[in-house]
Image (cartoon, rainbow, N blue to C red):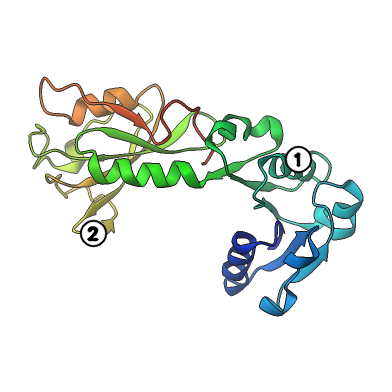
Amino acid sequence: MRIAIAGAGNVGRSIAGELIENGHTVLLIDRDPRAIKSDSLPEAEWLLADACELTSLEEAGLDTCDVAIAATGDDKVNLVHSLLAKTEFSVPRTVARVNHPKNEWLFDEQWGVDVSVSTPRLMSALVEEAVGIGDLVRLFTFGRGSAELVEMVLPGESPHVGARIGDMRWPDDTVLVAVIRDGRARAPEVDGTLEAGDELMFVTTDKQDRRLAELLAPKGARPAVVDSEPGEGHGSASS
């Protein structure tokens, strides 16, 4: 794939390096001459230009890209670049970095963002995941529809400890996608069982997450459904 990255700072260059190692063609765009460090990634294409200017993006051949990544440290720039990439150049997939949680609600399809990555949200989610046993933690909301990735550490008092996974009846629109046990992720097996302390990863919807939490919680308990960034709207599959 050909991938354009707006922002050639540490984040942009790191992403570019990973993508190049995976065999992709990468173009890095930045308007700051100090960010153009072609010696650091000689395999990449480099363009000194404003990633929010139509003429610059035409010069970059953005219409030939399969993915546009907005990875600058400025949320306004990331939004404008994503919108132009999607609406003016018909880039099939756009990914945007969110720097400030208060702006996360803006990063959606109306602004041309297919996937938003909120570092503050992910870091907060990891903290919640580490300390919250029995609470359901929303980790990631996909950009299209209401599907979300959630996690719950199965408490030892749950009535479903020892239950056969194939016998479980999850709420509608809910799929168990992974079980993390002893630090290792594994695909759920029909004949496998749920064990206390399992980290269970589900794809569900915002209408079913509370039902899922109540299903797995100890009888009589009132489990919380925790946003990884309390008080903010969900990110779109969503760092």
Residue 80's tag is 1
**Res. 201 in view:** no
Provide residue 10's location: percent of width, then percent of height.
61, 63
**Residue 231, relative to residue 91: is it above or below?**
above
Q: Amino acid at mark 1?
A: Val
Q: Residue furthest front?
A: 34
- Using the image, determine if residue 211 lies above or below residue 74: above
Q: Are marks 1 and 2 in contact (CB under 8 Å)?
A: no
Quadrant of res 33: bottom right
Q: Residue 21 at x, y = what percent?
A: 58, 74
Q: Is residue 162 above or below residue 110?
A: below
The amino acid pointed to by label 2 is: Gly
Picture mark count? 2
- Image quarter where the N terminus lies is bottom right
Question: Which comes sooner in the sequence, label 1 or label 2?
Answer: 1
Instruction: Locate residue 153 relative to residue 23 in the image: left or right.
Output: left
Look at 29% across and 43% down and name the residue there: 129
Can residue 132 be seen here? The reply is yes
- Is 47 on the left-hand or right-hand side of 125? right
Q: Residue at x 23, y 51 (%)?
A: 189
Residue 172, x across and y down, in percent: 34, 26
Label 1 SS: helix
| Residue wearing tag 2 | 183
